[in-house]
Amino acid sequence: MPDLLPRARSSQESVFAKMSRLAAQHGAVNLGQGFPSGSPPAFLLEAARRAIGTADQYAPPAGLSTLRGALGTDLGVDGDDVVVTTGATEAMGLLAQALYGPGDEVVMFDPVFDIYLPQARLAGATPVTVPLHLKEGEGWTLDLAELRAAVTPRTRALLLNSPHNPTGRVFSRAELEAIALLARQHDLWIISDEVYDELYFGQRPVNVRTLAPERTFTVGSAGKRLEVTGWRIGWVACPAGLSGKIAALRQIASFCAPTPFQVAVASALPVARETGFYEDLREGYAARLRLLAHGLRELGAQVHEPGGTYFLIARRPGWDAEALVVEAGVAVIPGSAFMAAQPAPEGLFRLAFCKSEAELKEALGRLERFTTGERRPLARHQP
Ligand code: GLN
C-alpha cells in the first residue's frame, strides 16, 4: 500500500479541536476553542431561514454580488475587490498559495495562531517568526528593530493579525505605519488577519489597508462578527485588480462558500451596523472579560487583559491544561500551543470569554475547588 506524504503524516489534530474533544469527553466547561455559546442575532437567523429553500445552488466563486457589495460598503472598499471564502481559514490558505512558494520567507509574530505556520509550509515557504515579548506591566511588546531584522531578500510577505490571537494585542497606528513603510521599502505583500476587527475594548483597531492599500489583503469573518463560526463565511479584501485571480484560485479549493449563508450575511451586515449590534457585542464581552479576569486574579493568576478578541492570557504556575480539563473540568488552551520559537512561560494559558456568564461563573467555581484541592495535599505535608 502506498504511504501518505510526510506533510500528511506530520499533520496533527489542532489544539482547538483537541481541547473541544477533551472538554466533551470530561464534561468540562469549554473556555478553550473560541466560539460563542450564545445565540447568533435573530435578524441573521431569520435571513438564513428565508434563504434556505430559495438560494440553494452554487454561488459565483468570488461570492454573491449582494454580499460583495455589502462587504465593500462595510469595509470602505470596492465590492469588486472582495472575494468571499469558506471561512477566514480558507482565505488565509488561499493567500498562502497565491503569494508565496518554495524559497520564499513569510514573516509573522510569535505567539502565532496555529494555522499560519503549516499554511506557509504547505505552500513551500519558510515561516520566520518575530517574538512579541511578554513584559511585566506592558503586556506583549513588539520590537520594530527585530521585525526589520527579520526581513531578508527572500521575504515575500508580512503576516499581521490585529487584534491578535492569542494575546489580544491591538497594533498601534505608529507600529502599522512602520510596518507599511517596511513593506514598501522591501516590496512585500501584507496579509492582515482582522477577523476580530469589531471585538475591541479600547481604541478601534487601525486597518493597515488604509496605510498600504496597494499591497494589503484584509481577511475578515462573519463567524466572528456575527457569532456563527460554523457557517464558514469569510472574506478577503484584495488590492485593486487582484480579486479575479484569488477567486479563480478559490474555485479549485471549495468552489464557493455556502450560498444561503452568503444571502443571510449580506442582509445582516448593514443591519448590524445600523442597530448598534457591534457596540452591544463589545459591551457584553467587556463585562464577561471583567468577570473572568477578576475571578482568575482571585485565584492567584496573573492576567494580561486584551485590547481586542474574546481571549485573555493568564499565568498561573502550577496549573496544567490537561490536568485542568480532566481534574478541574475546565478546558483552556495551553500557551505553548501558540509558541513557535519562544519558550512558553510555565503556567501560561489562553481562556475564551465568549461564553455565558453562567458558564464563566461555573468555570471559576470549578477552578476554585481545584485550587483548594490542589493545596490540600500540600497542607498535609506541612509540619
Ligand atoms: N479561532 C478559534 C480560536 O482561536 C478557533 C479556530 C479553529 O478551531 N479553527 O479558538
Image (cartoon, rainbow, N blue to C red):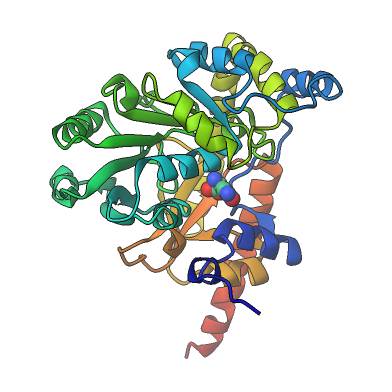
Q: Quadrant of residue 240?
A: top left
Tell me the quadrant of the picture where the N terminus can be found. bottom right
Residue shown at 63%/40% (left/top)? 254
Image height of 275 relative to 7, above or below: above
| Relative image position of residue 19 (x, y in whole percent) | 62, 61
| Relative image position of residue 97 (x, y in whole percent) | 43, 45
Residue 138 in view here:
no
Residue shown at 40%/25% (left/top)? 242
Residue shown at 46%/72% (left/top)? 318
Image height of 53 relative to 183, above or below: above
Residue shown at 29%/41% (left/top)? 158
Total residue callouts: 0
| Relative image position of residue 355 (x, y in whole percent) | 65, 42
| Relative image position of residue 342 (x, y in whole percent) | 30, 63
Image height of 162 relative to 367, above or below: above
- Front residue of this view, candidates 39 and 370: 39
- Front residue of this view, candidates 62 and 326: 62
Residue sitting at the far right:
53
- Front residue of this view, candidates 319 and 71: 71
Direction from residue 272 to residue 144 in the image, left or right: left
Residue sitting at the far front:
1
Residue 124 in view here:
yes
